[in-house]
Image (tube, rainbow, N blue to C red):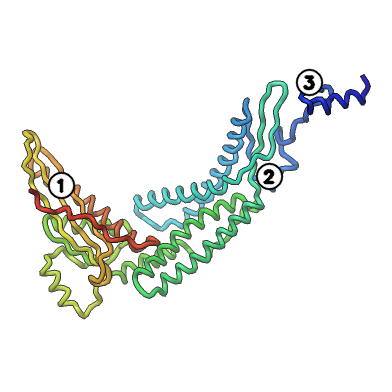
């Protein structure tokens, strides 16, 4: 057979569906990236990962995973370095919560970046039919997207800080500082991504310190925000303290000057101090414990209930309400009441603080809770 005929058979017969191999002409050579560094897909241009498996799907998954492992490892290292100098909280619980939040923001940011990973090339070895896949992330394209995102965060942070420092009312200032801190954390995660994607390993310096803005927020809350708490009913002191514990956990570390008082005493206090600045927020409500008579030869039961409201600007507007109830039991009436009190404290501490925090810090104001009272008399 002549060379011309051989060429014709090898090139055109496969197009007609005739399947035979011209192996003597040589198979596709091994790509350089299978055993070493690629010249076409250099590490300077791409963040690369390689996968190998008996099927192409598995090989592709392993290639994607290889890129993700490299990215996650380096991003975590960047954030740990940032955490060493940005952490200002001393409470262990606060540290843990902040670490979890940073990890979550980092994961979300990283997943957005890794969504742009592409399969660059694939090759199959003929002797054992093993697949090799190269996946990569275009550094230049991704870096441009991240820089654009950081620029948007910087503009938002500057606007929020300005609102925090010069806002016309308490809510505007609190929201400004809090949203600035939130966007700083988001920016920190994106900047960590940028430091990995950029071949130089450099990010974009920030104009604001998260620790400094947090200190400004804490100082403003401590010295300028006045929250009054009015609690009536059973277990006043315990519920009063539970409310303040919850407020402190949400960052409302204010001067704790109010005490659990009756409605009449509270009205008299407001009248006596009418010349002073009225509270920015008033938390008012009642709590109650009721012994239950149930057919149970072993346990005694106590029902607990609490109805609380948050009022803004000296009683002008109710911004939220929380009504909770439950039942606790024990072999003695005393222990049942203790357990009921503790359950009511946990509910009050969490719900009231989150209600106030959500109203102040969220983009949309909370609507008034329309649930009926939990402290209705038992029939």
Q: Secondary structure at mark 2?
A: loop
Image location (x, y in percent) of residue 114? 57, 45
In space, the residues marked 3 and 2 are separated at their CA atoms by 39 Å
Q: Which residue is mark 2?
A: 43
Neighbours of disc 2 within 10 Å: few (<14), some (14-19), many (20+) = some
Neighbours of disc 1 within 10 Å: few (<14), some (14-19), many (20+) = many
At x 83%, y 25%, the residue is 10
Q: What mark, if any, has residue 20 been given in the picture?
A: 3
First in sequence, mark 3 or 2: give its number.
Answer: 3
For discs 3 and 2, the disc positioned in front in the rendered view: 3
Q: Does residue 330 appear left or right of residue 76 in this picture?
A: left
Q: Which residue is mark 1?
A: 340
Q: Does residue 99 appear left or right of residue 306 in this picture?
A: right
In space, the residues marked 1 and 3 are separated at their CA atoms by 82 Å
Q: Is mark 1 in CB contact (under 8 Å) with mark 3?
A: no
First in sequence, mark 2 or 1: give its number.
Answer: 2
């Amino acid at each position: 057979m002549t060379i011309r005929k051989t060429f014709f058979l090898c090139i055109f017969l496969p197009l007609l569906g005739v399947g035979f191999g011209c192996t003597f002409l040589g198979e596709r050579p091994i790509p350089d990236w299978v055993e070493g560094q690629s010249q076409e897909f250099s590490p300077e241009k791409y963040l690369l990962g390689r996968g190998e498996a008996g099927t192409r799907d598995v090989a592709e998954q392993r290639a994607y995973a290889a890129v993700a492992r490299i990215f996650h490892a380096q991003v975590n290292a960047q954030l740990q370095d940032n955490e060493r100098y940005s952490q200002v909280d001393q409470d262990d619980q606060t540290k843990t919560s902040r670490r979890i939040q940073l990890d979550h923001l980092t994961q979300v940011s990283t997943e957005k970046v890794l969504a742009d990973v592409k399969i660059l090339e694939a090759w199959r070895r003929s002797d054992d039919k093993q697949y090799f896949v190269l996946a990569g992330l275009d550094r230049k394209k991704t870096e441009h997207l991240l820089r654009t995102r950081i620029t948007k965060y910087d503009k938002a942070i500057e606007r929020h800080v300005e609102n925090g420092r010069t806002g016309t009312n308490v809510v505007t200032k609190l929201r400004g500082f809090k949203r600035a801190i939130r966007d700083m954390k988001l920016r920190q995660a994106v900047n960590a991504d940028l430091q990995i994607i950029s071949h130089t390993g450099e990010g974009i310096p920030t104009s604001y310190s998260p620790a400094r803005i947090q200190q400004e927020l804490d100082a403003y809350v401590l010295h300028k925000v006045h929250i009054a708490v009015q609690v009536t009913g059973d277990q006043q002191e315990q519920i009063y303290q539970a409310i303040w514990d919850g407020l402190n956990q949400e960052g409302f570390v204010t001067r704790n000057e109010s005490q659990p008082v009756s409605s009449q005493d509270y009205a008299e206090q407001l009248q006596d101090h009418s010349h002073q600045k009225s509270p920015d927020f008033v938390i008012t409500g009642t709590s109650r414990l009721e012994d239950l008579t149930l057919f149970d030869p072993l346990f005694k039961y106590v029902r607990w209930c609490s109805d609380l409201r948050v009022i803004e600007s000296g009683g002008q507007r109710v911004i939220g309400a929380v009504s909770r109830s439950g039942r606790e039991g024990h072999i003695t009436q005393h222990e049942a009441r203790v357990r009921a009190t503790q359950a009511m404290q946990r509910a009050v501490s969490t719900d009231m603080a989150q209600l106030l925090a959500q109203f102040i810090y969220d983009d949309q104001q909370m609507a008034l809770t329309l649930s009926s009272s939990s402290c209705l008399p038992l029939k």
